[in-house]
Image (cartoon, grey):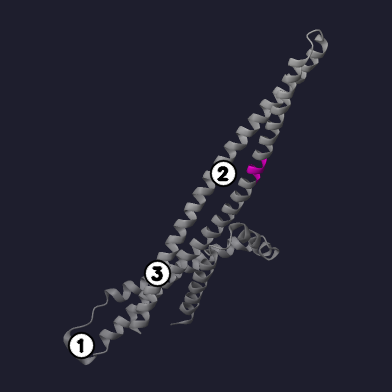
Amino acid sequence: MTLQWTVVAIFLYVEIAVILILCMPFVSAKRWRSLFNLSIWKWFAPYWNKGFFTMILILILLFCDALREVRKYSSVEPGPMADAKLNPNLFDHLHMKLFRSQRNLYISGFSLFLWLVMQRLVTLINQVAIATVTVTSLQTQAENANDAAKKYQEDNLLLKQALLEKDKDKAASKQVLRKEAEKLMEELKAAEEAVCKANTDLEAMRRQARGLTMEYDRLLTEHNKLQNLQTLADEGSKKDQ
């Protein structure tokens, strides 16, 4: 294996290791996001997009080169039987070249695919962490709004009871109490509207978090399939060698 394909193979193994670490179930998305927000990553942030697209371009070039080699050696046929008798190792040599080309094709292809998967996985982890924080905040707001609504309802009930117990002759006092009751009713209505809005936002964030979780599980399943394919490819390579 030449130097460039050795580097690509090492890069592929590093990608597999990183994706396995990111898929660990006992590490929450919030903890990963706190790690991604370290100052060292902020220093790399201005160069990340350029490095990402540069690596994609390099892997695409290597993939096209490997594909060209595969087509080259797949189209080559051994000569007549006379040539095969003169050079008996020609057939094995061609098959060896074809096998190496196919191996390079798989390595570059999987490296390119896992590079995109890793980028998408990091993005989904950040989105899940943000959605979790937002849902927690909305739940707190909804609980506070519910407590305020209950308090307003209790105050309104007390005021109604006070109004029933007041003497009918005290019209001025009743007028003041009515105004206070109307004010509390308006505040109660505003609090109920705030509760409805908070519940609506909470439900929307739950649906978004559920969708992100499903996308995360789908990517994890695809990763396991790719890992199995890579394992089979490596086992086939060892057997052929």
Q: At label 1, which amino acid type do we have?
A: Asp
**In the shown orientation, is residue 178 left or right of residue 66?**
right
Q: Which mark is residue 45?
A: none
Whole-percent x and y of residue 148?
Answer: 70, 33
User: Which image quarter is the N terminus in?
Assistant: bottom left
Provide the secondary structure element on which disc 3 rests.
Answer: helix
Residue 157 in which image quadrant: top right
Q: Please tell me how crowded label 1 is: few (under 14), some (14-19), or many (20+) other residues with Cα within 10 Å.
A: few
Residue 178 position, x and y percent, is 75, 16
Circle 3 sits on which residue? 228
Callout 3: 10 Å neighbours few (<14), some, many (20+)? few
- The residue that disc 2 covers is 205
Would residue 123 be seen by someone viewing this image from the given angle?
A: yes
Q: Secondary structure at mark 1?
A: helix
Residue under numbered circle 1 = 83
State whether residue 86 is above or below residue 20: below
Q: Is residue 178 visible?
A: no
N-terminal label among 1 and 3: 1
